[in-house]
Image: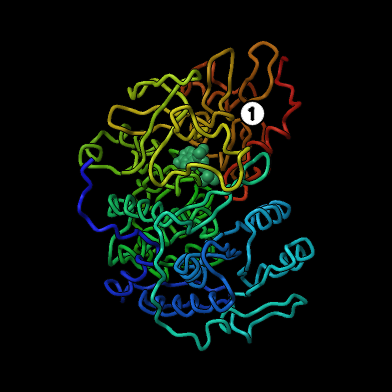
Amino acid sequence: MLPGNMMDRPLTVPSILDFAAEIHGDARVISARVEGDVHRYSYKDAHKRVSRLAHALRALGIGDGDRVATLAWNGYRHFELYYAISGIGAVCHTINPRLFEDQILYIVHHAEDRVLFLETSFLPLVEKLADRLPPDLRFVVMCAAGDLPETGLNVLAYEDLLAGQPDTIIWPDLDERQASGLCYTSGTTGNPKGVLYSHRSTLIHTMGLLAVGQSIGLSPERSLLPVVPLFHVNAWGLPFAAPLVGTDFVLPGTRLDGPGLFAFMDQEKVNTSWGVPTVWFGLLAEMRKHGRKPNGFDCVLIGGSAAPKPMIEEFERDFGVTVVHGWGMSEMSPVGSVGVFYARQRALPEEERMHLKTAQGRRMFGVEFKIADGEGTRLPHDGVAFGELHVRGPAIMSAYFNDEAATDGAFDDEGWLKTGDVARIDPNGFLFLVDRTKDVIKSGGEWISSIDLESAALAHPDVAECAVIAVPHPKWVERPLLITVLEDGSRLTAGEMQDFLGGKVAKWWLPDDVVFVDELPHTATGKLSKMTLREKFRDYRLPGV
Ligand code: AMP
């Protein structure tokens, strides 16, 4: 091998904020604070506070490889923690507060966290868990000393930590392969599993996002609001991509319901927002109520679960908001594909264009796709064959953190990560997710896609939300059951729903029954919890069985 003669400078997370402070110094971070007001500052100011926080962390004895946990909403202090912790060589471990208490306890112990930074609103939770947390864990409440609530815990105030620290810093020499972040996936079975990101993987993932930047709302002189939480998979990479590109970063705090989000987006003239479909159901309801979209809003990125076609159509046709559908997973930093459209796709007849928008997009640079059947044989990308999607790339996990049992079986013989998603890929590279391997309905040896059935049902104007799950059947092994939440005041019957689906899906795909419920269960990341539904309807008797 003839080695290249280029400098071996490491790719590091703090270099992003250094760059933003110098080049996009005036672009802003705007946060709806838990305290109730709106906080605004520039990336240049953020850099100063990050430097002070980094010095403060060192003063607390935090060093290379130490895990520092956060329990916080989307706000500027959480953003500062991302950079200060990883900047000094420690690991920013974001905890999802929506996890079950036992899961939170498990991951704090498993990660061996040294310090926990928490928002005031999570103090009651931490007080409740305190006896079962590691005895030497330190607590920092993310507020000023004067705002510290009464507590029996021994806590420090965030702003006290920063006081008196220098607002410049020379970052230590970091190895780009060292860990920078840690996030546990909220597995529906077993213990949560940790994904340990490195500086290098984070930078490569960020640059992959920027390669499609404009199409996903990432460009300077615009503003972007992540509804996707900073506490789950790096808010899909936005805390890194936004400052690098110089877009204003608008953080909603706890204003996450339809009315709260509408008002905040409207006030701050947010151009792009990213989040899961559940959030958009709420925002769209509010947009309908107002008869308009929030001021300036023109692009929405939908991911985390399949974007239903009626949702895509409503955003695009009724409100002129371009939908970009994306797919990813915690193990992938997390974005794997995004639905970037070029002139050729934009010019398609309306129905075809909408259909293509339901695809989960095309792979990002740095992510390779392979689909394989049950025996591991590669399948063609012909838009027809479908099998389990496998991925590989420099921003994709190579093992779970300190968890051999979970790592075993996560990869195939060639070292590709098995995603657990069933997909087909068309010749232009568009990915169509058919289902989760465990959600697909196996009827008489054939597969029925629960996602396709849900999309078809959601096209009915009376359906607010729905889920399709497999229920046992003596002859076919499994058959689909449609579980539906109706819009207020609707009197739709099961028979009418089945008639509606009649022309839209293959006859043998038609759900054997339709049940109506007041609400559907969701996971800690806002996705439908089909596991809970399967449990609830485990003994459900289909008609005629
Ligand atoms: P998580 O690691 O919690 O982000 O979950 C990752 C999983 O969410 C993926 O493996 C998919 O099953 C699902 N997912 C993510 N994005 C989409 C999407 N656009 N459509 C359908 N499923 C999705």
Q: Give residue 496's position: percent from left, percent from top.
A: 58, 27
Residue at coordinates 29% horizontally, 71% vertically from top-left? 24
Against 311, residue 433 (above or below) is above
Name the colour scheme.
rainbow
Residue 81 spot, x, y in % from top left: 50, 69
- The residue sitting at the front extreme is 1
Residue 222, percent from left and from top:
31, 65
Left or right? Give the position of 130 relative to 270.
right
Point out the residue furthest to the top here. 475
For label 1, the crowd category at 10 Å Cα-Cα, with few meaning under 14, some 14 to 19 and many 20 or more, is some
Kindly indicate the quadrant of the structure image that contains residue 363. Answer: top left
**443 sits left or right of 387 in the view:** right
Instruction: Please determine whether, in this image, residue 328 is positioned above or below residue 431.
Output: below
Q: Nearer the viewer, residue 9 or 273?
A: 9
Q: Nearer the viewer, residue 340 or 201?
A: 201
Task: Residue 50: name its quadrant.
Answer: bottom left
**Left or right of 70 in this view: 382:** left
Q: Which of 480 and 79 lies nearest the eye of the viewer?
A: 79
Q: Secondary structure at mark 1?
A: strand
Query: Quadrant location of the N terminus?
Result: top left
Q: Residue furthest right?
A: 131
Q: Residue at x 71, y 56 (%)?
A: 105
Residue 227 percent coordinates (x, y): 48, 58
Residue at the bottom extreme? 164
Task: Judge whether 225 appears above or below 442 on screen.
Answer: below
Q: State the residue at coordinates (56%, 65%).
A: 73
Residue pointed to by mark 1: 514
Residue 433 in sight in this render? yes
The amino acid at mark 1 is Val
